[in-house]
Amino acid sequence: MPSFMTTDKSDCSNYRGITLLLITGKVLVRILLNRFVPTITEGIFPVSQCSFRANRSTNDMVLVLRQLQEKCREQNKGLYVMFVESVASSTTWDAPSCRTKADEEIDNRLSKDNCAFGWLYKRVWNNRHLKKGTEISVYKAVVLSTLLYGSESWVTYLHHLRLLERFHQCCLRTILNIHWKDFVTNTEVLEKTEVISIKAMLLKTQLHWAGHVSRMEENRLPKIVLYSELNTGQHDKGAPKKRYKDSLKTSLNACCIDHRDWTVQT
């Protein structure tokens, strides 16, 4: 069945052929996939392969990498990371410097999301034909989803939350067309938009992710790395830097959950 693509309809080269498959063939392929995929994924793929697999995601390995960085930094052990990325027919290797702090990542996220928010100003935020509810939905899908991607394993400090909350409030006030002269509080802005604060979002995602990891099988890398410690190494003198387990403990206490038996409640 020919399908028109673009420009001149009288030119035969502007048509693309589309073949409609039989439903019986699709059913047969689905049956074969349901039988082959479990055997291939469990018997051939390594446990480190999380992309394009059911019940696994890239965030699993992001947590593993950040935990390895954090534990090696805590005990003054060297860590070498190499990323392999296939580009066209060639393969390149790159070993960037590993940073365990969230400062640089949050700054990059804020810079990119600020550009994305400004790019949508005329098309969405200042569009009189769109309802505020639609604009808020676009803001959640486009801006917040990219801003907080991978935030489940972040270790944030108070100044990080202030930067994120400031950006969050500026975006919501722009959508509602609220100026600083209107003297509208942050709580009122959240109530009008029916959106929770960044702090609440991070709290929700971190607890949800921690429960997800605790329910994993014992041979999964995220669970192994989260509950493990290095055999060698030495801590620095003085107060240790904030760790993921410290951030998780703070989140549990904020929800009145005992951190000593929180895995039972998951």
Image: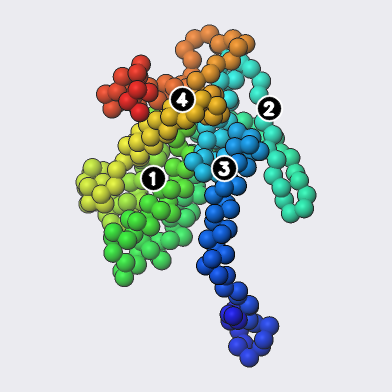
Q: Is disc 2 placed on a helix, strand or loop?
A: loop
Question: Which mark, by number, is residue 80?
Answer: 2
Q: In x, y percent, where is residue 89?
A: 77, 53
Q: Is residue 233 left or right of residue 185?
A: right
Q: Is residue 231 above or below residue 250?
A: above
Q: Is residue 24 above or below residue 154?
A: below
Residue under the point 42% across and 33% down: 212
Disc 2 marks which amino acid?
Answer: Tyr
Q: In x, y percent, where is residue 181?
A: 24, 51
Neighbor class of circle 1 (other Cα within 10 Å; few <14, some 14-19, many 20+) is some
Alpha-carbon span between mark 1 and mark 2: 34 Å
Q: Is residue 227 left or right of residue 211?
A: right
Disc 3 marks which amino acid?
Answer: Pro
Neighbor class of circle 2 (other Cα within 10 Å; few <14, some 14-19, many 20+) is few
Nearer the camera: disc 3 or disc 4: 3
Pointer 2 with pointer 3, Cβ within 8 A: no
Q: Tell me which numbered mark, 4 or 1, is placed earlier along the sequence.
A: 1
Q: Which is more toward the observer, 112 or 200?
A: 200
Q: Is residue 212 left or right of residue 257?
A: right
Pointer 4 with pointer 1, Cβ within 8 A: no
Disc 4 marks which amino acid?
Answer: Tyr
Which residue, given by chain and number where applicable, does mark 1 sit on?
Answer: 167
